[in-house]
Amino acid sequence: MAGTLRGAASTATETTAVAVRLVDPIDVVHSAAGARFPATLDEPVIAGDRVIVRKGAPAVVQLVHSHSEAELILLSIGDPPLEIHSAPVLAKQIRKAQGTGSHLGRDALAGALGGGLIMGRIGIPVGAAGGLLAGETIHAIRKQLGIPAETRIPFVLIQSIDAQ
């Protein structure tokens, strides 16, 4: 069972890295500031030589807006939950880290194969160009709308947490 380990006092200090993975996608354009989203801990939180919160434990991420740019903060981890104070992470940094190469390459290849099947050899470059254009369009829409489920988000604690 994933969750918070209780027992001897343990403290995760400021600057401790805490990575979570989203359960659901986040639509940063249409979601209201303050909206909360479920996540799971992607790595255990360790203090010294002791695991405070196990990998896979539930977590809660909150969407906040600051200076017209969406930011995420980590609110809690573990079961029972430990309140967390994390530095905000910009949504655009998360989207940028996802990259475009694999999506665009896959879409261009699918377009080339489809064009080649329909139009013979001459259709391969036309299909690749169409697939690349479609891939760029789809990727631009994904970037505008948000952060997909299963995205790994690295947070940094700005206040120590105690698990007792």
Image: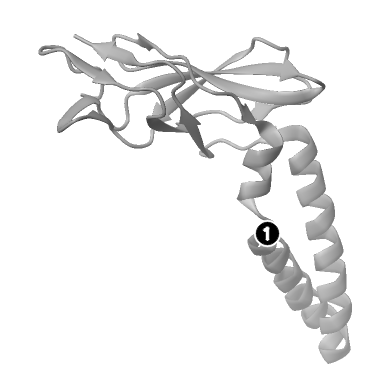
In front of the other: 130 or 153: 153
In front of the other: 121 or 28: 28
Q: Quadrant of residue 120?
A: bottom right
x%, y% of residue 112?
Answer: 77, 76
* View extreme (bottom): residue: 121
Left or right: 120 as drawn, with respect to 47:
right
Above/below status of 15 relative to 99: above
x%, y% of residue 92?
Answer: 71, 37
Q: Quadrant of residue 110?
A: bottom right
In front of the other: 51 or 130: 51
Above/below status of 134 relative to 16: below
Left or right: 90 as drawn, with respect to 5:
right
Mark 1 sits on what residue?
103
Q: Quadrant of residue 95?
A: top right
Q: Is residue 22 visible?
A: no
Left or right: 111 as drawn, with respect to 160:
right
Residue at left 38%, top 36%? Answer: 42
x%, y% of residue 131?
Answer: 81, 66
Counting other residues with Cα less than 10 Å from the Cα at mark 1, is it few (<14), some (14-19), or many (20 or more)?
some
x%, y% of residue 23?
Answer: 49, 29
Above/below status of 101 relative to 116: above
Residue at left 79%, top 50%? Answer: 138
Left or right: 130 as drawn, with respect to 108:
right
Quadrant of the snapshot with the C terminus: top left
Q: What is the number of callouts on the image?
A: 1
* View extreme (left): residue: 8
Q: Is residue 77 visible?
A: yes
Amino acid under label 1?
A: His
Q: Identify the secondary structure beneath mark 1.
A: helix
Residue at left 10%, top 13%? Answer: 8
Quadrant of the snapshot with the N terminus: top left
